[in-house]
Image (tube, rainbow, N blue to C red):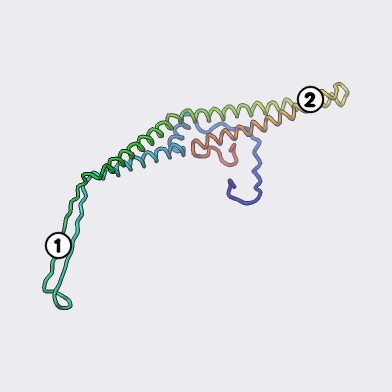
Amino acid sequence: RRVGARGQIAAMPADTAGAPDLPVTLADAVRSALDQGPQYRAARAAERAAAAEVRARQSGYLPSLFLSGSHQRFDVKFFPGAANVSALTLTVSVPIWDNGQREIALSQSRVNRDVARAVRADLERAAERDVTEAYDAYGTARATEALSTTGVLVARENFRVQESRYRSGATDIITFLDAQVRLTQAEADLVQARYASRLAIAGLEAILGRRLFSNKGAS
């Protein structure tokens, strides 16, 4: 349903490479979010639309000009030509009062413009916080993934040693199974860390409104 296809869809296998450095600095990410971020662009567009509506409502106070022309020919015969009359009319209409409907509509438009402006300003103030939070979340997930990778190497070596000792009769089955469980847990932690790093970069990309890595990278 999410990808618009019927039937089963197999997910692409995730790469096992470590999470790379971000290609943008925090300051560049904040500027990019304000320029290209979907929610910030939508807020600015809503403000422009509300301001245009106010200008449209204000035009109701301006006078209206109507220019019309006519030409008539008449006689008692077919193809009359005995008399013809031409007229050019200029009409000026000045709106004075329409039971306050014009003023109510203008007031509502101004309120909508002020609300849209406040929403846009609030989003722009929150941009630095949101981008910083997502930026640091990726950095934390990346560090966790690196530590989890080291943890797997340590657990794997410990399991190898305990297996050799168990085969030689130097340790009991409990110690051997404990090493096996620790290795399994370390591998599971690494999978979770990789998932967290990819989820963090997806969150940052959603705020920025663009991809930071190619499909073959950490995305």
- Please identify the quarter of the rendering in which residue 113 is found: top left
Left or right of residue 25: residue 160 = right
Residue type at the position of mark 1: Ala
Which percent across, then down, holds residue 210? 50, 39
Where does label 2 land, which residue? 178
**Image height check: is 162 above or below 106?**
above
First in sequence, mark 2 or 1: give its number.
Answer: 1
Where does label 1 land, which residue? 87
In this view, the residue farthest toward the right is 169
Which percent across, then down, holds residue 172? 85, 22
Left or right of residue 191: residue 58 = left
In this view, the residue farthest toward the top is 170
* Residue at position x 67%, y 33% in the image: 191
Tell me the element at label 1. Answer: strand
Pointer 1 local density, CA inside 10 Å: few below 14, some 14–19, many at least 20: few
**Is 17 or 141 nearer to us in this picture?**
141
Residue type at the position of mark 2: Asp
Left or right of residue 19: residue 33 = left
Tell me the element at label 2. Answer: helix
**Image height check: is 136 above or below 106?**
above
* Residue at position x 58%, y 47% in the image: 3
In this view, the residue farthest toward the left is 82
* Residue at position x 67%, y 30% in the image: 190
Which percent across, then down, holds residue 144? 63, 27
* Residue at position x 69%, y 26% in the image: 151
**Is 60 or 132 nearer to us in this picture?**
60
